[in-house]
Image: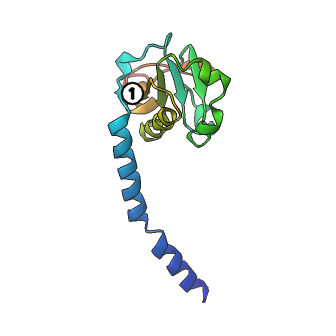
Amino acid sequence: MNKNEKLARFYARCDIDLLKGHLKELLEKAKEEIEEIEIEDIDLENMVLIDVREADEFASGVIPATRVFTIPRGKLEFAVDDKLVNVSDHQVVCYCLKGARGLLGAKTLKDLGFSNVVNLKGGIENWVKSGRSIKNYMGYFKLEAR
C-alpha cells in the first residue's frame, strides 16, 4: 500500500464532520446535566472557580476569585486532590474561553462526585466583554469601552 492509499484509509476512518457531530452531541448531553450560571450570579468571595483552559491561556489572565484553580480540562480528573475535595461543599464554577470546555469540565467533576458544579455561560470571554476585570502576573486588567 502506498502513502496516498494509507492517507485515504486514514481520512475515511477520521471523518471530521462525523467527529464534529459527535462533539456536538456530547456538548448537548452535557448541557442537559450541567447548569450554566450567568456572570451576574458569580460570587467571587464564596464560589470556587476552576479555569480549565490550557497553561498558555492562563497567562492572559484569570477571573480574580478568592479561590480560583487553573487546571487544564485534560488534567482535571487527575487534579482532584485534597485541595479540590476540601472545597467540594462550595459551589464550583468551571470556565474556559467561550464555554464548551468549561461545560465538559463541569460534567467531568459531576461524574467524579461533585454535586454543586456549574459552567460559566460564555466563559471568560463573556466575563471580559461585560466590563469585569481579570488578573494575571502583572495585575488587574479590564477591557475599555470603545
Image coordinates of residue 105 in percent, x first then y, are 50, 37
Q: Is residue 70 left or right of residue 41?
A: right
**112 over 5 or under it: above or below:** above
Image coordinates of residue 125 in percent, x first then y, are 43, 32
Q: Is residue 9 left or right of residue 121?
A: right
Name the residue tied to disc 1: 129
Residue 5's quadrant in the figure?
bottom right
Question: Count the marks: how many?
Answer: 1
Nearer to us in this view, 138 or 1:
1
User: Which residue in the rendered view is the most extreme toward the front?
Assistant: 113
Nearer to us in this view, 12 or 116:
116
Residue in view at x 55 percent, y 25 percent:
62
Q: Secondary structure at mark 1?
A: helix
**78 over 133 or under it: above or below:** below
Question: Where the N terminus falls, by quadrant?
Answer: bottom right
Q: Would you say residue 137 is visible in this rendering?
A: no
Residue in view at x 46 percent, y 75 percent:
12
User: Which residue in the rendered view is the most extreme toward the bottom?
Assistant: 1
Image coordinates of residue 103 in percent, x first then y, are 43, 37
Image coordinates of residue 64 in percent, x first then y, are 54, 18
**109 over 48 or under it: above or below:** below
**1 over 89 or under it: above or below:** below
Q: Would you say residue 15 is visible in this rendering?
A: yes
Question: Where the C terminus falls, by quadrant?
Answer: top left
Q: Is residue 83 left or right of residue 118?
A: right
Q: Is residue 87 left or right of residue 95?
A: right
Mark 1, Cα crowd under 10 Å, few <14 / some 14-19 / many 20+, is: some
Q: Amino acid at mark 1?
A: Lys
Nearer to us in this view, 137 or 37:
37
